[in-house]
Amino acid sequence: MEELGLTLVDEGGVALRQLMRKARQRMREEGSVITASVETFMEFIHNSPNVFRLLLRERTGNSLAFRKAVSRELQYFVVELADYIQQTQGYPAEEARIQADAMVILVFNAGAEALDSKPAERKLLTKKAIIQLRYVARGAEGYRKIRKLYQADN
């Protein structure tokens, strides 16, 4: 039974990562990677709530194997997003990873809130997550500028 559950976690993570890759492609057409990613993620939750519930539940579940599997899936998201940030924004690897980690946590938590929400509530949660992610992105930009100024002075 545990083997089946682990397979479901892996398959759910793979399906979600594929959707997020499509969101980044969609972004090229629509303009905002943050908006496209959050909207795609919320569509996934709406269309596959039980898969996301499984990921949420097992993230803190009793089984160490399940917790590790969900953690691994989340880290895959972080790594892919960090690579994207590094390639498109020119951030150093560590800064890109820190930013990506914060963004994945925010979106995952927004998804948890959106799970049983009505369409209007989900729309508000989507907007809120987009704004929060923009704050993180702007904060990362500000941090880079301050760090560069500090390094120039030393």
Image: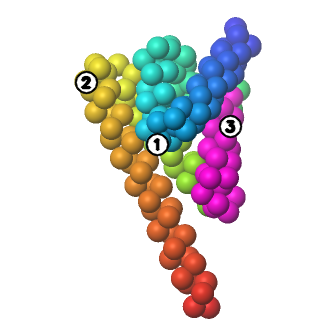
Q: Range of the magenta residues? A: 69-93
The 10 Å Cα crowd at callout 3, few under 14, some 14 to 19, many 20 or more, is some
Q: Is residue 70 above or below residue 50?
A: below
Q: Nearer the viewer, residue 121 or 152?
A: 152
Check disc 3 and give the amino acid type.
Tyr
Please provide percent x and percent y for residue 146: 50, 76
**Residue beneath the point at 46% across and 14% down:** 47
User: Which quadrant of the view contains residue 151?
Assistant: bottom right
- Residue located at (46% from left, 42% from top): 32
Quadrant (top left, top right, bottom left, bottom right) of the C terminus? bottom right
**Location of residue 130 by image quarter:** top left
Distance between the alpha carbons at the discs numbered 1 and 2: 22 Å
Q: Position of residue 8 (x, y in %)?
A: 65, 15
**Circle 3 SS class:** helix
The residue at which mark 1 appears reads as 32
Instruction: Compare marks 3 and 2 and give the one earlier in the sequence.
Output: 3
Q: How far apart are labels 3 and 2 at the CA level?
A: 30 Å
Secondary element at image label 1 = loop
Name of the residue lying farthest toward the bottom: 154
